[in-house]
Amino acid sequence: MELNLDSGRLVVFLGGISFFLLIESLFPARSWKESRIKRLFFHSSVAVFNSFLVRVLIYVPFLMWTVYVEQQGWGVSRWLGLNGWLEIIMSLLMLDLFDYFWHRVNHRIPFLWRFHKAHHADNEMDVTTALRFHPGELFLSSFAKALWVLVWGPTAIAWFIFEGLISLCAQFHHSNMDLPAPIERFLLHIIVTPSFHTSHHVVDRQYGDANFSTIFSFWDPIFRSYNQVPRGPDGQLEKDAIGLPEARDLSLSFIAWFSEPFHRRNMGLPD
Ligand SMILES: [Zn+2]
């Protein structure tokens, strides 16, 4: 059972990334500054590095924890007696709501931002950016999520669906694809689109510290954190300098990426 679900995850992940790599090659929104092969190689190495660490130390214990919480019947969803599709839909919403707040907190609390900024230090954005997370962020967010699982009590199946969906949605909204404006506008009512999320990656913090939603896009308008860079006459974002104000040219250095949280500048010390 676990093996099937596991290979299912891998198929969804690889299928998604191949699909979005193809789409952004055919309909790119921005031209690339750096070689795409180099970006794919660098971010895939990050993903392989993370999956070794994360799989053993987080993924397996987390799955056991979710199953244990379900067997004990803990959590609000159990007490409400939710089951079937209603439970799955409510759990998707509640887990995504948690991610919205967790992402927002990552931008607000300096200690968490140190780790999350390793993701934002990419000077371009395409589907490979979806692989770029610091293992420290993955550890911290897993602890926080484990607590939320205890509070809400999703079924293990809802958790799996959520995980699959989040990986596809992250690939989609990071991808450098030029979605026709009417489709983009329509999708934006429900899910996070590439232009919505590109705005979150611009250097200008007025926009970078907004648009925190991950799967469903309505959390930002609901919680008043929606602020999207206006689109220019050519349909592109008017400001699309992507990345962070500092460390502008080390986006594909493994050492710079890994040491980002421990940089003196990020600990409030002089360089
Ligand atoms: Zn962010």
Image (spheres, rainbow, N blue to C red):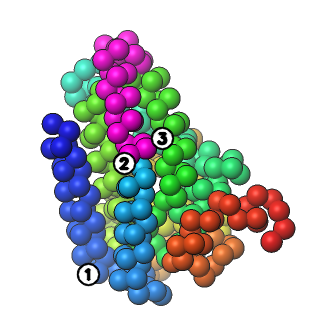
- Picture residue at 34% right of the left edge, 22% below the top: 68
Mark nearer the N terminus (2 vs 1): 1
| Residue 206 drawn at (x, y percent) | 66, 62
Residue 229 position, x and y percent, is: 56, 67
Residue that badge 3 annotates: 142
**Is 187 or 19 nearer to us in this picture?**
19
| Distance of label 1 from label 3 (alpha carbons) | 36 Å
User: Residue 26, how many percent across, how many down?
Assistant: 26, 81
Q: Which residues are magenta?
A: 55-81
What secondary structure predominates along the stretch shown in magenta? helix
Some atom of ligand 1 lies within 8 Å of the CB belonging to the residue at label 1: no
Mark 2–mark 1 Cα distance, whole angstroms, equals 34 Å
Taking the image as drawn, is residue 220 in sight? no
Q: Disc 2 on helix, strand or loop?
A: helix
Choose between 121 and 258: the one closer to the eye: 258
Which disc is residue 55 wearing?
2
Q: Which residue is mark 1?
A: 26
Name the element at disc 3: helix
Q: Is residue 27 magenta?
A: no
Kind of residue indicated by mark 1 = Leu
